Amino acid sequence: MQSDTLALASPRERLVFAVKWGASAVQIMGYTATGFGWTPWNLYLFLVGVVGWFAVGALWNDKALMLVHLVALGAMIAGMASG
């Protein structure tokens, strides 16, 4: 059953909710893939999660959240390019 809070939310708030939880689920899959040694799939999952959380930061206009995930994205891309 859908919560009353989500049912009354604006379309933008519902979008943020979906991206936030989707990115979180994908990042959890990335941690799981890392635990089982499933490379490079773990990196691909983390990339999707990081981009999703960057998008949430942009939608919230949260510069700290955007910065953390932009730096993480840059580090991941640099690491993937060097390997």
Image (spheres, helix red, strand yellow):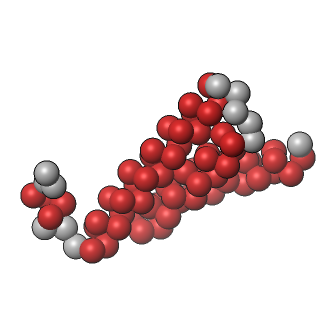
Q: Among all residues in the image, which is located at the extreme left?
A: 4
Residue at position x 50%, y 64% in the image? 55
Count of picture labels: 0
Is 83 situated left or right of 25 in this image?
Answer: right
Left/right placement of residue 44 relative to residue 52 reads right
Which residue sits at x=75%, y=41%?
A: 40
Q: Position of residue 50 (x, y in %)?
A: 57, 52
Q: Quadrant of residue 19?
A: bottom left
Asked if residue 28 can be seen in this view, the reply is yes
Q: In x, y percent, where is residue 67?
A: 58, 56
- Up the image or down, 25 lies above or below 37; here it is below
Q: Residue at x 18, y 60 (%)?
A: 6
| Residue 63 percent coordinates (x, y) | 49, 61
Instruction: Specify the quadrant that holds the C terminus.
Output: top right
In the image, is 78 to the left or to the right of 4?
Answer: right
In-front residue for pair 16/75: 16
Residue 26 position (above or below residue 63): above
Q: Tell me residue 62's x, y (percent).
A: 44, 61
Please identify the quarter of the rendering in which residue 15 is found.
Answer: bottom left
Q: Which residue is most to the bottom?
A: 11
Q: Does residue 62 appear in the picture of this structure?
A: no
Question: In front: 79, or 66?
Answer: 79
At x 56%, y 31%, the residue is 32
